[in-house]
Amino acid sequence: MTEKCVVRNAQYRRGGLNKRERHNERKNAGYQNEDIVKERAAAITAVVEQKQEAAAALDEQTVKKKRQLDGLEKKTAAAKQEAADFEDIDRIS
């Protein structure tokens, strides 16, 4: 397996290197994103939760459908075997 690495070369001021090193090595005590609009954060969180709930419901439906399909496949296999058994009996008679 080949390992890959992404390198981005950018110019930084000397004073900013320590801050970037702490961030890159995950040594910061806390992280924050100033771009987040706090008034919209609750609404966005609600939308994300709704999508997660919908995905979970869809997963449940998929599992149910798969179980139904598995049951039909087993019934079909049993019916095919029964038909083959009848053909064998018919050949003997």
Image (cartoon, rainbow, N blue to C red):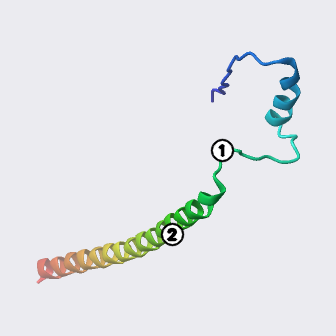
Quadrant where the C terminus sits is: bottom left
| Residue drawn at (83%, 40%) of the image | 26
Mark found first going from the N terminus, 2 or 1: 1
The crowd level at tag 1 (other Cα within 10 Å; few <14, some 14-19, many 20+) is few
Where residue 85 appears, as percent x and y from the top left, is 23, 79
Residue 7's disc number: none
Where residue 16 appears, as percent x and y from the top left, is 84, 25
Which residue is at the front of the view, 59 or 87? Answer: 59
Mark 2 vs 1: CB contact within 8 A: no
Amino acid type, callout 1 = Asp
Which residue is at the front of the view, 24 or 40? Answer: 40
| Residue drawn at (59%, 62%) of the image | 45
Which structural element holds mark 2?
helix
The crowd level at tag 2 (other Cα within 10 Å; few <14, some 14-19, many 20+) is few
Where residue 69 appears, as percent x and y from the top left, is 34, 72
Which residue is at the front of the view, 52 or 41? Answer: 41
Instruction: Give the labeled residue for mark 2.
Output: 56
Q: Find residue 40 and report its image quarter.
A: bottom right
Where residue 82 appears, as percent x and y from the top left, is 24, 80
| Residue drawn at (51%, 69%) of the image | 56
Question: Relative to 13, is 2 above or below?
Answer: below
Residue 35's disc number: 1
Quadrant where the N terminus sits is: top right
Which structural element holds mark 1?
loop
Horizontally, residue 17 falls left or right of residue 8, namely right
Question: Relative to 5, is 28 above or below?
Answer: below
Which residue is at the front of the view, 40 or 27? Answer: 40
Number of callouts in the render? Answer: 2
Residue extending farthest to the front is 39
Amino acid type, callout 2 = Ala
Which mark is nearer the camera, 2 or 1?
A: 1
Gap between marks 2 and 1, in whole Å? 30 Å
